[in-house]
Image: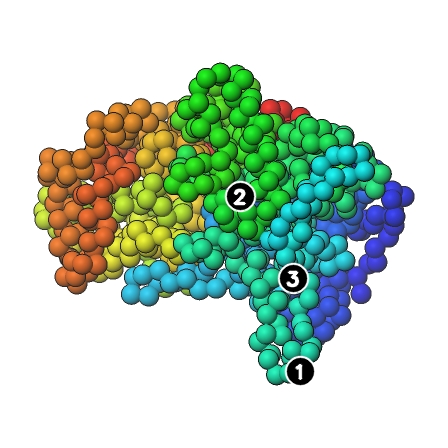
């Protein structure tokens, strides 16, 4: 068996330290895990047995640091960041943990000695699909950075039994399948049922007077569930620090009724279990029904109630004075999903701990900060009073009281302005009486931040203008970032080695050092090495897509990539129109085929199950791909790929291979974006609008190395105010007209015009996100892309400068900004 743990630190109950790894020691520990953990011999083991044994072997090296970190922090009693997020899109853990512990080479040699290909074991891991897109991936990047920076943080979220659905295509249409990410075991989690939390729902409240003559409200719930914590380790990069991610799963308090079972009603006997476990069954249940809306609210309250209870009752010392709570915690609300935590903390402080209302409110206002991730009104959660009152009656009372006090402050600050008070009220009266969660977060939060410079400006000026006028000091900006460990060092090993050989390895934790690459953009030898890295990354992607999806992509084409959540504002339809216009140009003779730059267009996107137009867009992209890829007239010039089930694992192969990054949302609609940052840091050039973090990317990399197109946000608003008529653009632009006509004709759908009509009719009649208005500008920018790509040496220089000048977009820098501007920790 491998070396035993040895105690080396007297702190607390004795944290343990793992001895330094050697290949022989690692082999011994791996075989011990295989024999005594999985109960199999190497000769009889399956790939899954081997993967689980390897993961648990790596886990041991993290656990020693995890215990050490926890003991040190319990002794230090410092302020903690409580990161409340409904999503954590973690990606596969094995590669990241091997990187963090510097065990990649040792593990690879050790597995080779055992006759095992470590790449096969890496491929066995199923990534936790606990997020939908940028929001969840951002949360994962942030907790990675906080661990790397040795900042005390607990990430809190939900352990969905089924994460974001697995996507497949049937007859070109998206089909959702359950994401059974736990079916083969999860070696990275540690369940702790002994730390379960009781969460209550429903019922009523009763008023009573306590011994001091103070009127108190008591919540008498109808039903309750248990929250079971599952801990995940979040390692810093080779610094001995391991923070904790705590995800909650729901369980019934009385899961099984033996008497009912013995009476023969087997389904009824487990009804309570089924009902309770629905809360954490699936990420973002379809909410177009009343039942779906209620389940979403149950999810949100469940995880914040568990998290607040965990920190107050299990993390703080037993004798801690809660009047000092702001000294020990600040909860960052990652979008509106966790905002129900605000009345929950008030309920705990007032109803459970007995504090006076005013005192509790002053504490609460210092314990929360709110990040808004959207500019879309429909994404700012609003809960009907009827639902909130039925599910959480005490919390609705608390929200009403908060709102009453807030409106009194508004009237005092702006006397006589009743319309202003109505606009700012946390309670909306129309179309149904509802609670505006973004307003509640703004009223209660110590700070409110957007996630890119433009977004933060629009948040102040357009989304929450009355609040920013009343409390300008509350509003700030923190531009998003990504972790360079996963998305450069791990995902793009070839580029990482080239950068490290050139400027040293300090860039991995200080991404600003990439600036040292700038002079090498003018070095012909370095440019050649850079191009070789890009080509090798393309070959790796082509091999993966052939095995994964049966896609055989051409080798000598520009890789033009658009991967992101499928939403109309992101304008996948604009990319589609560009492809169809090129296809139409070639087949009609308008564009000589031999003058067209060979391009492979790659899409990756999932549409929310209830989002009809997004699903119709996916269908149309696949339909166009089917024709383009089989038409000999465009062979060798155009090809389209839409690999199903885009996730972090695929992103890690696709992003390093990309030549062109499509960031083409309508200006003023994208909050920030993080995909744009990943592509730039991996040497892709961006074509994009002045939207979200594109603004900052363009400013940093330079106009000569960014392809800008489209209206700016003020122009969008001016056009909307004048009255936008998409038909005018269709009638006045011959290329646009012939493109849409070809789509509408059924050319890509075997003559079936009806299946194309939803997208085409929407563009011509509504076009909410002004695809047609920006079409010509987009084509002009794509012509500039072709001209630039024709000079491969010049393109490589621009790509190198994108890498060198994008160090600002490290999530480490984002965390420093949060620490300085918001958390003060």
Residue that numbered label 3 is attached to: 251
Residue 253 visible, this orientation: yes
Mark 1 or mark 2, whichever is nearer to me: 1
- Which sits in the foreground, 645 or 483? 645
Q: Are marks 3 and 2 in contact (CB under 8 Å)?
A: no
Query: In whole angstroms, how far apart are the C-alphas of marks 3 and 2?
Result: 21 Å
Q: Are marks 1 and 2 in contact (CB under 8 Å)?
A: no
Residue that numbered label 1 is attached to: 262
- Height in image: 257 above or below 671? below
Q: Quadrant of the C terminus?
A: top right
Q: Secondary structure at mark 3?
A: strand
Q: Earlier in the sequence, mark 3 or mark 2?
A: 3
Q: Secondary structure at mark 1?
A: helix
Q: Earlier in the sequence, mark 1 or mark 2?
A: 1
* Residue shown at the point (21%, 26%) measured from the top left: 722
Residue that numbered label 2 is attached to: 337
Q: Secondary structure at mark 2?
A: loop
Dot 1: within a 10 Å radius of its alpha carbon, few (fewer than 14), some, or many (20 or more) residues? few
Q: Which mark is residue 350?
A: none
- Height in image: 145 above or below 161? above
- Which sits in the foreground, 440 or 25? 440
Q: Can you name the residue that lies furthest to the right here?
A: 10
- Height in image: 823 above or below 243? above
Query: In whole angstroms, how far apart are the C-alphas of marks 1 and 2?
Result: 42 Å
Query: In whole angstroms, how far apart are the C-alphas of marks 3 and 1?
Result: 22 Å
* Residue shown at the point (35%, 41%) measured from the top left: 570
* Residue shown at the point (76%, 70%) measured from the top left: 36
- Which sits in the foreground, 221 or 696? 221
Residue 511 percent across, percent down from the top left: 56, 31
Q: Quadrant of the N terminus?
A: bottom right
Dot 2: within a 10 Å radius of its alpha carbon, few (fewer than 14), some, or many (20 or more) residues? many
Q: Are marks 3 and 1 in contact (CB under 8 Å)?
A: no
């Amino acid at each position: 068996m491998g070396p035993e743990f040895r105690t080396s630190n007297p702190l607390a109950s004795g944290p343990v330290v793992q001895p330094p790894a050697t290949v022989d020691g690692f082999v011994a520990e791996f075989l011990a895990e295989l024999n005594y953990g999985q109960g199999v011999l190497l000769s009889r083991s399956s790939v899954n047995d081997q993967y689980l044994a390897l993961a648990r072997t790596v886990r041991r090296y993290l656990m020693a640091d995890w215990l050490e970190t926890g003991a040190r922090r319990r002794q230090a009693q410092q302020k903690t960041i409580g990161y409340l997020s409904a999503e954590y899109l973690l990606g596969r853990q094995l590669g990241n943990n091997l990187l963090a512990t510097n065990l990649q080479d040792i593990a690879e040699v050790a597995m080779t000695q055992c006759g095992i290909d470590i790449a096969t074991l890496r491929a066995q891991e199923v990534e936790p699909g606990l997020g939908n897109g940028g929001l969840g991936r951002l949360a994962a990047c942030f907790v990675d950075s906080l661990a790397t920076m040795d900042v005390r943080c607990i990430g809190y979220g939900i352990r969905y039994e089924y994460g974001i659905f697995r996507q497949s295509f049937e007859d070109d249409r998206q089909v959702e399948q359950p994401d059974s990410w736990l079916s083969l075991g999860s070696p990275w989690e540690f369940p702790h049922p002994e730390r379960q939390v009781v969460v209550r729902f429903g019922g009523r409240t009763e008023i009573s007077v306590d011994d001091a003559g103070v009127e108190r409200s008591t919540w008498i719930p109808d039903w309750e569930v248990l929250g079971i914590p599952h801990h995940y380790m979040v390692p810093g990069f080779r610094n001995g620090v391991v923070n904790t991610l705590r995800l909650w799963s729901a369980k019934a308090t009385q899961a099984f009724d033996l008497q009912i079972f013995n009476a023969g009603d087997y389904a009824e006997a487990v009804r309570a279990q089924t009902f309770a476990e629905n809360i954490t069954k699936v990420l973002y249940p379809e909410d177009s029904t009343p039942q779906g809306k209620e389940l979403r609210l149950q999810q949100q309250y469940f995880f914040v109630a568990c998290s607040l209870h965990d920190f107050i009752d299990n993390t703080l010392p037993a004798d801690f004075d809660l009047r000092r709570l702001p000294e020990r915690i600040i909860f960052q609300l990652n979008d509106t999903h966790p905002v129900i935590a605000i009345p929950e903390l008030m309920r705990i402080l007032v109803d459970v701990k007995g504090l006076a209302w005013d005192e509790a409110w002053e504490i609460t206002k210092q314990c929360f900060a709110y990040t808004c991730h959207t500019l879309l009104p429909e994404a700012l959660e609003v809960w009907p009073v009827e639902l909130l009152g039925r599910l959480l009656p005490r919390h609705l009372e608390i929200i009403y009281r908060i709102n009453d006090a807030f409106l009194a402050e508004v009237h005092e600050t702006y006397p006589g302005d009743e319309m202003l008070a109505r606009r700012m009220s946390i309670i909306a009266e129309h179309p149904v009486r509802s609670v505006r969660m973004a307003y509640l977060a703004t009223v209660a939060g110590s700070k409110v931040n957007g996630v890119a410079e433009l977004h933060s400006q629009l948040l102040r000026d357009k989304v929450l203008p009355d609040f920013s006028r009343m409390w300008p000091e509350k509003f700030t900006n923190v531009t998003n970032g990504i972790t360079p460990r996963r998305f450069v060092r791990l995902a793009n090993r070839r580029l990482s080695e080239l950068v490290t050989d050139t400027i040293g390895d300090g860039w991995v934790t200080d991404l600003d050092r990439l600036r040292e690459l700038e002079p090498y953009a003018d070095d012909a030898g370095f440019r050649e090495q850079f191009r070789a890295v890009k080509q090798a990354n393309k070959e790796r992607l082509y091999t993966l897509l052939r095995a994964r999806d049966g896609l055989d992509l051409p080798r000598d084409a520009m890789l033009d990539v658009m991967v992101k959540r499928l939403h109309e504002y992101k304008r996948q339809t604009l990319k589609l129109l560009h492809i169809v216009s090129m296809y139409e140009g070639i087949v009609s003779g308008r564009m000589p085929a031999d003058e067209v730059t060979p391009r492979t267009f790659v899409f990756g996107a999932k549409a929310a199950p209830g989002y009809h137009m997004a699903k119709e867009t996916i269908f149309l992209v696949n339909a166009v791909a089917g024709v383009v890829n089989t038409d000999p007239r465009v062979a060798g010039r155009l090809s389209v790929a839409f690999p199903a089930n885009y996730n972090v694992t695929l992103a890690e192969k696709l992003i390093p291979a990309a030549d062109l990054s499509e960031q083409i949302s309508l200006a003023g609609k994208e909050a920030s974006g993080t995909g744009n940052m990943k592509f730039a840091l991996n040497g892709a050039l961006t074509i994009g609008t002045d939207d979200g973090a594109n603004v900052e990317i363009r400013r940093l990399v330079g106009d000569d190395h960014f392809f800008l197109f489209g209206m700016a946000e003020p122009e969008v608003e001016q056009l909307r105010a004048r009255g936008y008529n998409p038909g005018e653009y269709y009638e006045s632009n011959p290329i646009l007209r012939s493109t849409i006509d070809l789509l509408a004709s059924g050319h890509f759908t075997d003559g079936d015009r009806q299946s194309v009509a939803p997208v085409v009719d929407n563009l011509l009649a509504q076009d909410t996100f002004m695809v047609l208005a920006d079409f010509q500008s987009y084509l002009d920018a794509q012509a500039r892309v072709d001209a630039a790509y024709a000079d491969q040496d010049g393109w490589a220089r621009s790509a190198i400068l994108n890498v060198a000048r994008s160090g600002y977009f490290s999530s480490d820098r984002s965390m420093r900004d949060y620490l300085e501007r918001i958390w003060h920790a």
